[in-house]
Every structure is written in C-alpha cells, then in structure tokens.
Image (spheres, rainbow, N blue to C red):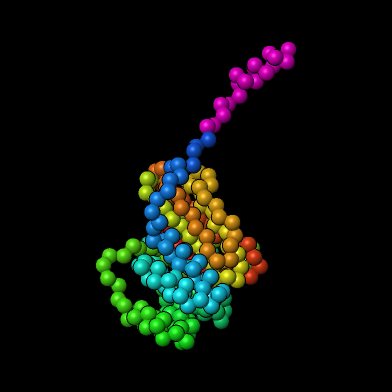
C-alpha cells in the first residue's frame, strides 16, 4: 500500500525544475586588467602609508597613473543614493593613488632624500603617453550595516573585474551574482580593497552588492573594467 501511494504521488507531482548553472566560465588565469591594477595600487598605497614608505608609495602612484579612469555609463544603482554625510568632503572617500593628494603625501615623505625627490618631481611632470587601459570608477557612501546594490551588463567570454575600495573606516564585503541570483564571486569584508575576477559564459546582467560590515559610515570606490 505504501509503495502504491508513493508511485501515485510521483506520477502526479510536478517535475522538478532543473537549476540553471551560474553564468560563469571555468576559472582560468589571465592577464590582470585595468581594475586589477587599480586595486593593486590601492593595496600598495595602504601598506606604504602604514609603513611610511615613500618608495612603495611612489610605485603605487606609478601603477595607478598607468590606468585611465572614467565614470560608468551602463551601471545602475538599485539602492538609494545617500550621498556624503552633512559636512563631509572628499576626505571621507578612499585616497586615490592616482590623485593629487597621494602625490602631495609622497612629496612630504621624500623631503630627506634628494634622489627620491628628483623621482617624485619627474613623476609630477610626466604626461601620459600612448594608449592606456581604461577602468570604470564611481564613488559612493554607505552606512554601517547597510548594503548597496549595483546592476551592470557584462559580455560573455570576456574577462570581468569588479573591485571595491574602502576608506579604512569600516570593512566592506563584495558579492557578485548573475541574473538568476547564483553567486559568481564573493569576497569577505575587508577594510581596504577587495577584487572579483571571473569570465561570464554569456552576455547578461550582474548584480554587485557592497556590504558595510561595520558600524561606521564609509565612503568607497567601485571599480570595474
């Protein structure tokens, strides 16, 4: 009797839906792109500031200046744009190793070394030459315990890089999901910078979640290729 009931239930139950595979090609090592370079420059700058190391900071600035940064044209922010807190300024955002602020700090650190000063001022006078890789960069603020969600289209079979840079006030986590909600990449919360590198199997829209795992409001920079 039990066997007959189980057979009847199996015959009249709706078929199970096959789960769609994540929009992701198998992992493969490839050349680091523009977003990876900016994340590496950010990490090098953070370490240089921690050590007070002008040579490492010089390397971070050089690396960041090899990349052209442009604002996004196809990213959509799905959560409310909170903007900077009242009275806040750009100091609440991560220090950009390609910006004037990092260069000013480097000049201050190089005051005791004439040879390093020459390198710094040569760097300041240099103009970009030739074609440089381009990264998409935008800035935002995120309250403690909150999550921002961004929607962006990516091309199939083309390597994608998405990174987040925090200002050090609060650890930020990064999660990328495809159109079905499957997790493509997840990086644990970090106070400096996180990076996801993957290759979509096909054209599609991806959701990027930036989570503030701390209690403090944080400015951050979202980077993509």
Question: Is 38 drawn above or below residue 98 in the view shown?
Answer: above
- Is residue 7 magenta-colored? yes
Q: Residue at x 30, y 76 (%)?
A: 127
Q: Position of residue 217 (x, y in %)?
A: 60, 70
Whether residue 39 is visible to the viewer of this picture, yes or no, is yes
Q: Residue at x 40, y 68 (%)?
A: 63
Q: Position of residue 80 (x, y in %)?
A: 53, 64
Question: Is 121 drawn above or below residue 210 in the view shown?
Answer: below
Q: Residue at x 43, y 75 (%)?
A: 58
Residue bounds of the magenta highlight: 1-18
Question: Is 76 drawn above or below residue 8 in the view shown?
Answer: below
177 or 59: nearer the viewer: 59
- Is residue 207 magenta-colored? no
SS majority, magenta: helix
The residue sitting at the left extreme is: 130
For the image, the number of numbered tags is 0
Whether residue 79 is visible to the viewer of this picture, yes or no, is no
Q: Position of residue 40 (x, y in %)?
A: 46, 64
Q: Residue at x 39, y 71 (%)?
A: 62
Q: Position of residue 131 (x, y in %)?
A: 28, 65
User: Could you tell me which quadrant the C terminus lies in?
Assistant: bottom left
User: Could you tell me which quadrant the N terminus lies in?
Assistant: top right
């Amino acid at each position: 009797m039990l066997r007959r009931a189980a057979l009847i239930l199996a015959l009249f139950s709706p078929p199970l839906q096959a789960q769609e595979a994540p929009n992701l090609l198998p992992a493969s090592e490839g050349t680091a792109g523009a977003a990876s370079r900016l994340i590496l420059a950010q990490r090098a700058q953070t370490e240089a500031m921690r050590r007070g190391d002008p040579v490492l900071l010089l390397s971070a600035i050089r690396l960041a200046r090899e990349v052209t940064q442009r604002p996004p044209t196809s990213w959509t922010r799905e959560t409310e744009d909170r903007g900077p807190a009242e009275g806040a300024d750009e100091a609440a955002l991560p220090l950009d190793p390609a910006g004037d602020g990092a260069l000013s700090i480097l000049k201050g650190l190089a005051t005791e070394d004439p040879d390093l000063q020459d390198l710094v001022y040569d760097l300041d006078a240099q103009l970009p030459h030739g074609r440089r890789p381009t990264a998409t960069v935008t800035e935002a603020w995120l309250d403690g315990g909150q999550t921002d969600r961004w929607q962006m289209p990516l091309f199939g079979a083309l390597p994608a890089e998405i990174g987040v840079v925090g200002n050090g006030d609060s650890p930020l986590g990064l999660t990328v999901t495809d159109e079905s909600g499957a997790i493509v990449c997840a990086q644990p919360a970090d106070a400096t910078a996180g990076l996801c590198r993957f290759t979509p199997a096909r054209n599609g829209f991806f959701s990027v979640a930036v989570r503030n795992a701390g209690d403090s409001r944080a400015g951050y920079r979202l980077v993509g290729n």
